[in-house]
């Protein structure tokens, strides 16, 4: 039964990642934490997310905002070590509780049409927060998604820039996680088993992306964030 649940999580998250540019880590990590210990769940997510980004980047290069991407990367360099220290020192339940509150509050602000003016300094800050969340809980997506949604960024630019950024952030975070927290056979065996489902998700996600309009895309974004925030909150309370 666990194998079936694991497969469904990976397939659905892969479809969302391909069609939106952010869905895999946000959807997969919380549910993987039900099946694996935190270190394994986070590293499986990092490996598979990196594979997805590598598979898609050649198709969406034209949509990447290069200047913003560079600032995200620079900002994330400061966030990566903060995240891994947080993972090693702070209770995971407390960390998930804080993240869930942040996600829920900011999602509500977005639904209420709160808007952020895109600025170079804010790009650096968002990259830093994203980097710290990647090494700590394997979820770089929330700050990027909230930032892009708040600035009314087109879905093509959102998907292209986030996927390009993920190439750097997932690889760097995986290396740091393995060195600082160690790894296990479970991580790599589970990741290899998941690859066929990832590629099926890539195909399905490409079709979905063509049919999702900008307005529907925004509400889809809000729904995913709200569900993730509530899930993380409930799990942190009961764990």
Image (cartoon, grey):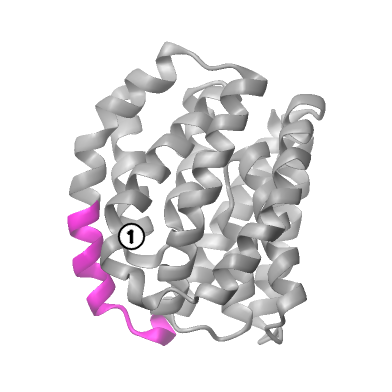
Residue 212 drawn at (x, y percent): 31, 78
Residue 39 drawn at (x, y percent): 58, 24
Which quarter of the figure is the N terminus placed in?
A: top left
**Residue at the location (61% across, 84% down)?**
151
Residue 233 drawn at (x, y percent): 69, 46
Q: Is residue 30 above or below residue 102?
A: above
**Residue at the location (55% across, 48% down)?**
169
Q: Is residue 68 above or below residue 4?
A: below
Q: Is residue 130 above or below residue 195?
A: below
- Residue 161 included in the magenta stretch of the image: no
Question: Can residue 60 be seen in this snapshot?
Answer: yes
- Report how many numbered discs are placed on residues in the image: 1
Q: Quadrant of residue 114?
A: bottom right
The magenta-colored residue range is 202-216
Query: What predominant SS class does the magenta segment belong to?
Result: helix
Residue 198 drawn at (x, y percent): 26, 43
> Closest to the observer: 161 or 111?
161
**Residue at the location (55% across, 56% down)?**
227
- Residue 212 included in the magenta stretch of the image: yes
Question: Can residue 2 be seen in this snapshot?
Answer: no
Tag 1, which secondary structure?
A: helix
Q: Quadrant of residue 15?
A: bottom left
Q: Does 196 sit left or right of 40 as displayed?
A: left
Residue, disc 1: 57
Q: Does 68 sit left or right of 206 as displayed?
A: right
> Closest to the observer: 79 or 45?
79
**Residue at the location (71% across, 78% down)?**
120
> Closest to the observer: 196 or 28?
196
Which quarter of the figure is the C terminus placed in?
A: top right
Badge 1: how crowded within 10 Å, few (<14), some, or many (20+)? some
Q: Quadrant of residue 229?
A: bottom right
């Amino acid at each position: 039964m666990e194998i079936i649940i694991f497969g469904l999580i990976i397939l659905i998250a892969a479809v969302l990642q391909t069609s939106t540019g952010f869905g895999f880590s946000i959807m997969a990590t919380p549910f993987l934490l039900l099946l694996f210990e935190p270190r394994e769940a986070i590293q499986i997510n990092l490996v598979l997310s990196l594979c997805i980004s590598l598979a898609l980047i050649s198709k969406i290069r034209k949509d990447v905002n290069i200047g913003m991407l560079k600032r995200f990367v620079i900002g994330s360099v400061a966030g990566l070590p903060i995240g891994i220290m947080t993972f090693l020192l702070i209770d995971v339940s407390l960390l998930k509780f804080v993240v869930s509150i942040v996600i829920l509050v900011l999602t509500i602000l977005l639904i209420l049409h709160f808007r952020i003016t895109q600025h170079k300094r804010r790009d650096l800050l968002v990259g830093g927060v994203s980097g710290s969340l990647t090494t700590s809980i394997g979820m770089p997506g929330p700050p990027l998604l909230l930032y892009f949604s708040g600035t009314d960024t087109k879905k093509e630019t959102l998907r292209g820039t986030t996927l390009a950024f993920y190439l750097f952030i997932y690889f760097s975070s995986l290396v740091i996680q393995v060195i600082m927290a160690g790894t296990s056979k479970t991580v790599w065996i589970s990741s290899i088993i998941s690859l066929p489902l990832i590629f099926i998700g890539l195909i399905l996600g490409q079709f979905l992306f063509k049919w999702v309009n900008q307005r529907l895309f925004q509400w889809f974004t809000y729904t995913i964030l709200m569900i993730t925030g509530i899930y993380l909150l409930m799990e942190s309370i009961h764990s």
